[in-house]
Structures are given as C-alpha cells and as structure tokens.
Image (cartoon, helix red, strand yellow):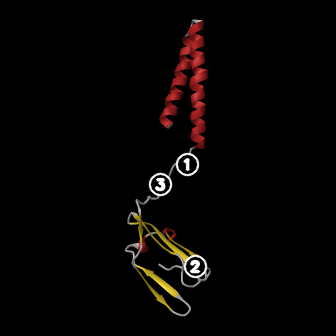
C-alpha cells in the first residue's frame, strides 16, 4: 500500500508541474479536475485506510492463524461399550482410539433423568454417538459426569 501511496504522491506532484505549464483553459481545467477529484481523493482514502489498518507485526512476532473447524463426514453409532455398576453408581466405558487427542469440548454428554446421549465430534474425521433412552431407574442429572 505504501508504494501505491508513493505513486499517487508522485502523480500529484507531476499534475502540479503540468498545471503551472498549461496555457490553455480547457487543459488547465481538465488537469485541475484530475488533480482535485481523483488524485487527492485517492490519497485521502489511502491515508484513512492506512490509519485504520492493523499495526504490522514485529520481526519476532508470528501471525495468529485461525483454523476453521473441520466438519465431519458422518456419524458412527457406538455399540461396543462396557459398564460397571454398584448400588450407588453405574459407569459406562467406551473405547475410542485417539479420543484423548481431541479437544474436551468435542466430547459432549447430555444426561436426563432416564437417558444419556454421548457425542464425540471430529475424531479421525468422524463423529461418534451413543444414545441410551429408557434407563431402568432414574439417575441424578447433577451427579452425573464424564471422564476422559
């Protein structure tokens, strides 16, 4: 952008020099219009854009890249699981290779009094889901949790 601004400044200077040399009114008016309407306006716009532009990074700073989330192609229903139960607790175990490498926000479990819904998003390009409705007994929604 700086080179473009420099070029506009040079164009403005040249237009001023040409204006001083003109003897014909029509040529003088055309150069004046070009100078005022186009070149000066472009310079003002470039200056405003430059002042609004984000400051450039220092030599030792690295730009921050934002990676868009990868959308998964399809959802796999989890049917292989195990559980352990006692009088007070029931633990459900799932084995999904690589689940510890996905962000924790990609592993969601929704509990209701009679159901739970597991969803693992973007694990090896797929989503994994397990929904269990109509549990034998009501569960404590507040006391239910997940562990990775």
Relative depth, front residue between 113 and 84: 113
90 lies above or below 6? below
Residue 113 is drawn in which quadrant? bottom right
Q: Residue at x 59, y 33 (%)?
A: 45
Residue with the mark numbered 3? 63
Q: Nearer the viewer, residue 14 or 104?
A: 104
The local secondary structure at tag 1 comes to loop
Question: In the structure shown, which secondary structural element does the residue marked by tag 2 occupy?
Answer: loop
Left or right: residue 77 compared with residue 32: left
Which mark lies nearer to you, 3 or 1?
A: 3
From the top left corner, tell me how far across and down residue 17 is, in percent.
54, 17
Secondary element type, mark 3: loop
Residue 116, x across and y down, in percent:
53, 76
Compute the Cα span from label 3 to label 1: 12 Å
Q: Tally the marks.
A: 3
Query: Of all residues shown, which one is farthest toward the bottom?
Result: 87
87 to the left or right of 79: right
Q: Which mark is first along the chain, 1 or 3?
A: 1
For the point 54% across and 28% down, the residue is 9
Q: Comparing marks 2 and 3, which lies closer to the viewer?
A: 2
Residue placed under numbered mark 1 in the picture: 55
- Residue 97 relative to residue 43: left or right: left
């Amino acid at each position: 952008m700086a080179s473009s601004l420099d070029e506009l400044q040079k164009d403005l200077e040249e237009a001023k020099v040409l204006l001083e040399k003109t003897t014909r009114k029509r040529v003088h008016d055309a150069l004046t219009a070009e100078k005022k309407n186009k070149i000066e306006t472009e310079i003002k716009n470039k200056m405003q854009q430059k002042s609004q532009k984000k400051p450039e990074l220092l030599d030792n700073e690295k730009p921050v890249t934002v990676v868009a989330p990868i959308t998964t192609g399809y959802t796999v229903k989890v049917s292989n699981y195990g559980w352990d139960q006692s009088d007070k607790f029931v633990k459900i175990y799932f084995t999904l290779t690589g689940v510890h490498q996905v962000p924790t926000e990609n592993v969601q479990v929704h509990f209701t009094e009679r159901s739970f819904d597991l969803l693992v998003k973007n694990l090896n390009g797929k989503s994994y889901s397990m929904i269990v409705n109509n549990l034998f007994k009501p569960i404590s929604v507040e006391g239910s949790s997940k562990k990775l």
